[in-house]
Every structure is written in C-alpha cells, then in structure tokens.
Image (tube, rainbow, N blue to C red):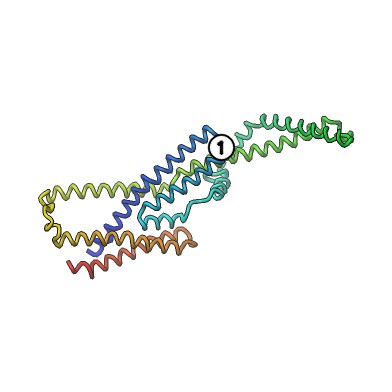
C-alpha cells in the first residue's frame, strides 16, 4: 500500500505534538497567567514589572514547547508565529485593539470609570501642588525683592486658583495615563495565558483520537491474535515480518523527522510572506516529502520483502 508509511508517520507526529501542546504549553501558560493575575490583584502598583515578567515567561514557555515537539510541529508553529511578541508590541496592540484593548468601548468605559473615581484625590493633589507653587513664588519674591504676583490679576488668590486648575488638569491626565497603563498590564498578563482556540480544539481531537486508536489497536490485536502470537524466542523476532516492521518503523521516523526539518527550512525561507502562505508551504512540503517516502518504499524497499 503506497501510503502505509506516510500515513502512520503523520498520525504519530500529530498525536505527539497535540499531547505536548495541551500538557506542556496550554496548561502551563494558563497556570502562569492565573498566578500573575493573582499577584496583580494583591500588588496593583507592581503592574509594570508583572506585565514584563508575563511577556518574558510566555516567550520562554513557547520556546520550551517548540524544543519538545517534532520538527514538523515546530515548523508549523513557527509558520503561524515566527517568534513571540516583544513587550512594546504587546503594549501597542492592547492600546489600539478594538476587540481586547483600549479600543474596545467596554474597556475604555472601565478606564474612564477609574479616572472618575479618583477625581477627588486628584483635586487634593492639585491644591497641595498649588500651595507649593505659592510658597516657591513667595520665596523667590523675597530673594529678588520683587512682587510675587501681578497686582492687576487680583492678588495671590487668583494666582493660587490658576495654579490649582493647571495642576488639576495635569493630575487628571496623569491619572488617565496610569489607569490606562493598569488596564493594559492586566490585558497583557491575562493574554499571556490565552492560546489559539481553534488550534487547541484540533489538538484535543487529535490527541484524544490518537490515544484511543493506540489503545483500541492494542486491545484488538490481543483479542484477535491472542497472547500465543507474541514471539517467545529470539529466532522468532528475526523473521522477515519482524525485520520488515523494524524497517517500517525506521522509515516512519525518517518521514517524521526528515520531512519536518525540510518543512522548517522552507518556512524560514518564506518568513517575509504572509502567515497563510507560510503555513501552506510548510504543510505542502511535508506532504510531498511523505509522498516521496511512500514512493520509495513501494518501489525500492517494499519489493525486498
């Protein structure tokens, strides 16, 4: 059968990569994000350090995941996203995105509500700052011997309220910037635990199907052939069917690794192209390699057995 090697190779590769994704990437990212969100709730003033840590931790988790999967799985992952985003890219994304960032009306309303809650605090700070400005003006006037305020402006009261209004506007702008930054930090930390839902669904189906087929195949083999069919002596293992199985297993490994390495190289060569084109190129390369492997097995290696 021409694809008796190609299909098992693809099946094993996809099942293994799916398991690693669900156990070592998705679960780890979610756990880390939940921990950092808890830290953010307890220490909101540390949001800048926490979001930087979340970005670094997510990229480290992604790199560790890619080192553990097969070459084809890594080629496919890099075709979807060549590398993790930098902190500056994440900040810009959540400041402008209309679905999950400040561009979303609900999130902007939350920012404005936070700013409104802090208006009395800002007013108090503005009055204190205006008083400081008045004291500095008095000290400067005493040193220079000049009048601290313009007599025509209405004496020091007018100068005080002018400074208070100016400082209040400054405090409000700073509060808006701080609230926006806090919301962006929360989005970055929460986003570090989110992964592609579509790929996760496919990975769950693949992992579940793969494990089910392996278990069912083992049970059916035992029920169909019985335990007596298992070789008892070394000479039984060296028969031609056993050697053929070993060669098939070797070909399966070559198909999974060699095709994945080739697909990864193609993906790197296409790094400047759109994501869809890169993914198509990687998958096409793997299919062509496995087709070539199946052809070689059918016409060159298979007849030897």
Image-quadrant location for residue 178: top right
Residue under label 1: 46
Number of marks present in the image shown:
1
User: In the picture, which quadrant includes the C terminus?
Assistant: bottom left
Q: Nearer the viewer, residue 257 or 21?
A: 257
Q: Residues within 10 Å of mark 1 (few under 14, many from 20)?
A: some
Q: Nearer the viewer, residue 17 or 274?
A: 17
Q: Secondary structure at mark 1?
A: helix
- Residue 214: x %, y % from top left: 24, 49
Q: Is residue 244 left or right of residue 169?
A: left
Please determine whether, in this image, residue 16 is positioned above or below residue 291.
above
- Residue 71: x %, y % from top left: 37, 57
- Residue 16: x %, y % from top left: 32, 51
Residue under the point 30% across and 67% down: 292
Residue under the point 27% across and 60% down: 252
Image-quadrant location for residue 127: top right
- Residue 192: x %, y % from top left: 47, 44
Please determine whether, in this image, residue 299 is positioned above or below residue 223.
below
Residue under the point 41% across and 63% down: 265
Q: Nearer the viewer, residue 139 or 114?
A: 139
Please determine whether, in this image, residue 19 is positioned above or below residue 261.
above
User: In the picture, which quadrant includes the N terminus?
Assistant: bottom left
Name of the residue lying farthest toward the left: 228
Q: Nearer the viewer, residue 95 or 84?
A: 84
Q: Is residue 115 left or right of residue 276?
A: right
């Amino acid at each position: 059968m021409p694809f008796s090697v190609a299909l098992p190779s693809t099946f094993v590769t996809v099942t293994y990569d799916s398991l690693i994704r669900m156990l070592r990437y998705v679960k780890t990212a979610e756990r880390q994000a939940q921990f950092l969100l808890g830290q953010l709730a307890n220490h909101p003033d540390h949001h800048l350090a926490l979001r930087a840590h979340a970005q670094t931790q997510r990229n480290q988790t992604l790199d560790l995941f890619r080192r553990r999967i097969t070459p084809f799985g890594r080629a496919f992952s890099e075709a979807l996203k060549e590398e993790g985003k930098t902190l500056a890219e994440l900040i810009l994304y959540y400041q402008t995105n209309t679905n999950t960032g400040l561009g979303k009306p609900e999130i902007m309303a939350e920012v404005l509500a936070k700013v409104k809650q802090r208006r009395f605090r800002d007013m108090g700070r503005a009055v204190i700052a205006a008083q400081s400005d008045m004291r500095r003006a008095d000290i400067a006037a005493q040193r220079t011997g000049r009048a601290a305020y313009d007599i025509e402006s209405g004496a020091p009261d007018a100068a005080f309220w002018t400074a208070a209004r100016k400082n209040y506007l400054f405090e409000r702008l700073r509060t808006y910037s701080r609230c926006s930054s806090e919301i962006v930090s929360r989005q970055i930390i929460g986003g570090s635990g989110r992964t592609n839902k579509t790929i996760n669904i496919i990975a769950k189906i693949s992992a579940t199907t793969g494990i089910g087929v392996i278990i069912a195949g083992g049970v059916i083999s035992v029920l169909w052939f019985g335990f007596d069919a298992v070789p008892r002596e070394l000479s039984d293992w060296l028969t031609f069917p056993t050697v053929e199985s070993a060669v098939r297993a070797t070909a399966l490994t070559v198909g999974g690794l060699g095709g994945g390495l080739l697909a990864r190289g193609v993906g790197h060569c296409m790094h400047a192209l759109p994501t869809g084109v890169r993914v198509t190129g990687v998958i096409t390369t793997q299919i062509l390699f496995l087709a070539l492997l199946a052809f070689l097995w059918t016409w060159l290696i298979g007849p030897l057995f």
